[in-house]
Amino acid sequence: MPPTHSPTVRLRRLARELRRVRENSGLSPEAAATRLGWSRSKVSRIETGRTRATPADVASICDLYGIGSEARAGLIQLAKEGRQRGWWTAYADVFTGSYVGLEDEAALIRQWEVQLVPGLLQTEDYARAVIAAGRPGEPDPDDVHRRVMARMARRTLLSRPTAPALFAVLDEGIIRRPIGGPAVMRYQLEALLTAARRPNVTIRILPYSAGAHAGLEGAFTVLSFAEEEDPDVAYVEGTAGDVYVESTDHVDRYRSAFGRICDAALSEEESLKLISEARDNFSHD
């Protein structure tokens, strides 16, 4: 079973706390780096979570800023937890960013998709068709299989005792596009109907008839966490790279856009009816 906490989220929290205590001390990053005997870039990398601070690094920082023993112990513990390995590190060649670690800790996942069934809801055959289509040239069967298995491992998130709530809004084109052939699509749509029966999963469809809407600029995900000190993160995946949005104003925009997309989407009941009709339109051939 995966750990009950995510090293990625702990690293993010530690980075935020170390930046806060430096700012409270009145020291600039340059002054802190000088007193610690570090480079300016090391301080920056630690405070933005791009580098994992070691417990020794955190102890040095606490000495510099005069952090009390209780707060010091908490920060050092965060550094230790941030260095633990999450389940996804077994697929480090597949999961190259920090998204899976953040997803692993989320209490609520709000997802708007325009092209594909979300990864957490994909069947094995559908995932294989998607992954093979996205590989350049002639796909390596072993590479495709490993990526599919990684996606299936990730999918178990929704069935854990502490599973997050998933609220997914899908463009109607997703349930019409015959990825993998009719039989694969029929089974995938049946899997969506089954997933929607879970108490922690909500699936709604944005119909073609909605016309122009708040999600036209592309898919995105907003991750929310159980602990208040961990603010929401918006995530946008693209060919040119992944973008993580953490500033309050920008995340608010994505939350607002998601709300407006929901306003334009079909109700849950209407959505499941449309998925069922789309499933029946795919033959068994």
Image (cartoon, helix red, strand yellow):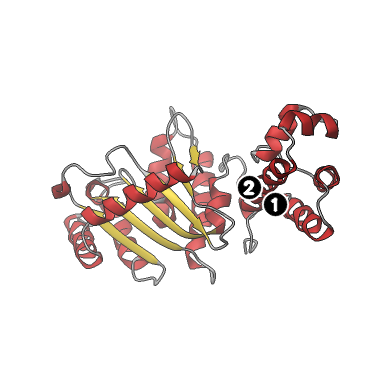
Q: Which mark is residue 12?
A: 2
Which residue occupies the extreme left position in the image?
Answer: 209
Are discs 2 and 1 less than 8 Å apart at CB?
Answer: no
Which residue corresponds to the image point at 64% horizontal and 46% vertical from the top-left? 16
4 vs 14, nearest the viewer = 14
What amino acid type should be assigned to the residue bearing mark 1? Arg
The answer to whether residue 17 is left or right of residue 265 is right
Which residue corresponds to the image point at 25% horizontal and 65% vertical from the top-left? 268
Say if 11 sits above or below 1 in the image. Answer: above
Q: Quadrant of the N terminus?
A: bottom right
Tell me where residue 124 appears, x and y as whole percent: 42, 54
**Disc 2 crowd, CA 10 A, few/some/many (<14, 14-19, 20+):** many
What amino acid type should be assigned to the residue bearing mark 2? Arg
Q: Nearer the viewer, mark 2 or mark 1?
A: 2
Tell me where residue 250 appears, x and y as whole percent: 43, 41
Say if 189 sits above or below 56 in the image. Answer: below
**Disc 1 crowd, CA 10 A, few/some/many (<14, 14-19, 20+):** some
Q: Which mark is residue 85?
A: 1
